[in-house]
Image: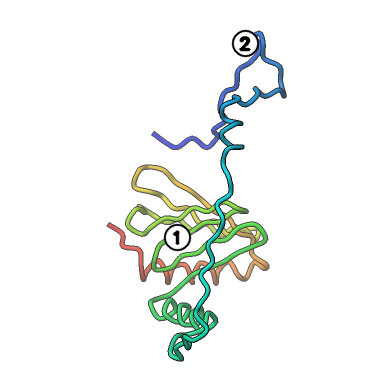
Amino acid sequence: MEQRVDPNIPLESAVGTDPAYIPGLTAPRPAEAAGAEEAKEPVPEQSVEPEPDAAAPEDVPTPDEEGAATEAEEGASGPVFEVADRRGSIRADRDGIRFRLDDQEAEFRWDELGAVEVKPARFGRRFTVTVHLSTRRWFDAEVDAPARSHLDEWTAELDTVLDAYFEEA
């Protein structure tokens, strides 16, 4: 059985089954739900202020140093592949593969992947990566390259990451 490609659109009630159906109108909220939201009061935030007598330890890194240290640790652990365009991005690192499109994100760990397929466009600038899960489902992400020459570079970089982390069984 294959995964359906068409969009999964929920069925909506129509005039034929519901004579009171009027398109565009929504049902009013129940009164008890509206009352429950009004009953909630904002919880005042408790602020914790450091004592003025306590001296800050000098060996604790500042937030800027922590970010640099984290990036250095990630870079030392292995190769990372990341490409992005104005809407989406594809990232492959030691944790797995992550797809982003606008405000949506999908993350796949290496142990749940069955196969990874790379499809550079033959004539255009579109770079497509499809991940196939062991549950017979697949997900793909597309990124537009700034130039066609980047497609071959991206394919080689992703192959390096896949060779390092992805184990074919």
Q: CA distance from mark 2 to mark 1?
A: 45 Å
Kindly indicate whether the residue at mark 1 contacts the one at mark 2 (C-beta within 8 angstroms).
no
SS class of the residue under badge 1? Answer: strand
Q: Which mark is residue 18?
A: 2
Q: Residue at x 47, y 67 (%)?
A: 158
Residue 140 spot, x, y in % from top left: 51, 51
SS class of the residue under badge 2? Answer: loop
Residue 101 spot, x, y in % from top left: 59, 53
Mark 2: give few (<14), some (14-19) or many (20+) Cα within 10 Å.
Answer: few
Mark 2 or mark 1, whichever is nearer to me? 2
Against 102, residue 148 (above or below) is below
For label 1, the residue is 97
Please identify the quarter of the rendering in which residue 79 is found: bottom left
Residue 93 spot, x, y in % from top left: 43, 68
Q: Which mark is residue 32?
A: none
What residue occupies the far left of the structure in this picture? 169
Q: Residue at x 35, y 63 (%)?
A: 166
Label 2 sits on what residue type?
Asp
